[in-house]
Image (cartoon, helix red, strand yellow):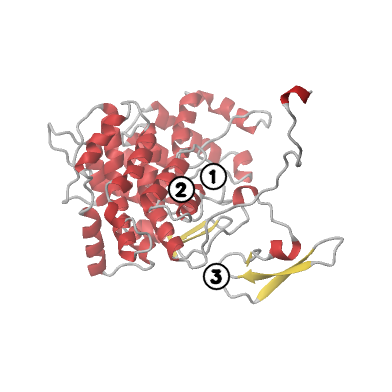
Amino acid sequence: MSGSAKRSITISLDGTNKSSTLPLMDGTIGPAVADIRRLYGDLGIFTYDPGYGATAACESKITYIDGDEGVLLYRGYPIEQLAEHSTFIEVAYLLMNGELPKPTELKEFEFGVLRHTMLHEQIRQFYNGFRRDAHPMAVMCGVVGALSAFYHDSLDINNPESRRISAFRLIAKMPTIAAWAHKYNIGQPFMYPRNDLGYAENFLYMFNAVPAEPFKVNPILARAMDLIMILHADHEQNASTSTVRLAGSTGANPFACIAAGIASLWGPAHGGANEAVLKMLAEIGHVRNIPEFLSEVKDKGSHTKLMGFGHRVYKNYDPRAKIIQKACHEVLGELGIKGDPLLDLALELEKIALNDKYFVDRKLYPNVDFYSGIILKAMGFPTSMFTALFAVSRTVGWISQWSEMIEDPEQRIGRPRQIYTGAAQRDYVTPGRRG
């Protein structure tokens, strides 16, 4: 670990003369971390941390979050600055390489990504193995995992050039995979990517266009999509990123690791949260039902949850939510959407919750999932595609984290420990003697 150990803590085990001195590691910013690797050897005990909420499983230079202050940094750059001035392709370069690119570097990187967007033609046939009504995330899990069967030339994880090629392929092909999952679901022809379009534009084109007529991508919607991708590109050691790292720690190929991340992202408590927001709004049904719904949320005996508000890490306003809130209203204005009951309901719920003392006191502010769900619905995406879009955006973070892990000399195969609370050792009893 690069953090210097200038301080330490000592833990004594009650009733014995045993103690363990643990070095405190300091990162660039953020709380100090106790290195507990020698704790079991010194005291014969493990630590207990369900959900790993207070455990650093790795050292990383990619993303930093301060949940109390509402701070999100990519490689040290505030998300607010990147959202205002950068593009998703530039952010992808930053996350993968550690620095913002020079103009020539950005041009070369963008060329590399945008020239790898096509899929092997046999993969087109792979889609026919799914039912028409398969969830897009199920399709993406299968197709991404299957990429390793098509691209044998870049599976050597110990070869930097193989890792670079795999990264390009995953970032470039993910929008095509996601767009084709949608097209397959609705029975429309697959649209091939175009080299004259940018990353977000290409996705919107493949998602919306049909061969029967020309399709022009709205630049405001393309910028909104690019912004959504920037905001979702990485988010430190969340569940899906930790899944990618854990799978990668076994030496699994990058396509398998990213497929594992997609599976983890699918859960409603993680990537499926924006889909859950729309389902919640549908259940509320009408603006007049909001007061009754919020009363149920406040009732401790109720299982009703206010989806899209609050965050596991952020105890302040999610910085991404502030950015996307503005974009949300710009998209609604551009599309001229008025009178959509679900969107009207969402905006009214936002207004009421932001002025309700119960939610304000508990710092339950709208998060990025609340607004991204509204934007995506306004842009015509079915709710089943919300998490798939999240996967497209997060792929660059996953592959950056995976590459960093592979290059970390201290990284070992992931192997969490446990508190065993089952039966103690006992002898086998034959069937006839079992009472």
- In the displayed orientation, state which residue is furthest to the right: 15
At x 44%, y 46%, the residue is 261
Q: Which residue is mark 2?
A: 321
Local secondary structure at mark 1? loop
Q: Position of residue 396 (x, y in %)?
A: 37, 54
Q: Callout 3: few (<14), some (14-19), or many (20+) C-alpha neighbours within 10 Å? A: some
Q: Quadrant of the image for the C terminus?
A: top right
Pointer 1 and pointer 2: residues touching (CB < 8 Å)? Answer: yes
Give how far apart the Cα atoms at labels 1 and 3 are. Answer: 36 Å
Asked if one can make out residue 285 in the rendered structure from this viewpoint, the answer is yes
Q: Position of residue 84 (x, y in %)?
A: 35, 57
Q: Kindly identify the amino acid type of the residue bearing the numbered disc 2.
A: Ala
Pointer 2 and pointer 3: residues touching (CB < 8 Å)? Answer: no
Q: Quadrant of the image for the N terminus?
A: bottom right
Label 2 vs 3, first from the N-terminus: 3
Q: Which mark is residue 365?
A: 1
Give how far apart the Cα atoms at labels 1 and 2 are. Answer: 9 Å
Q: Callout 2: few (<14), some (14-19), or many (20+) C-alpha neighbours within 10 Å? A: many
Local secondary structure at mark 3? loop
At x 53%, y 41%, the residue is 309
Please state which of residues 288 and 425 is positioned toward the viewer in this rendering. 425
Q: Kindly identify the amino acid type of the residue bearing the numbered disc 1.
A: Tyr
Q: Kindly identify the amino acid type of the residue bearing the numbered disc 3.
A: Met
Query: On the picture, is 381 further left or further right than 368?
Result: left
Q: Which residue is mark 3?
A: 1
At x 44%, y 56%, the residue is 251
Label 1 vs 3, first from the N-terminus: 3
Closer to viewer: mark 2 or mark 3: 3
Name which quarter of the figure residue 340 lies in.
top left
Please state which of residues 190 and 67 is positioned toward the viewer in this rendering. 190
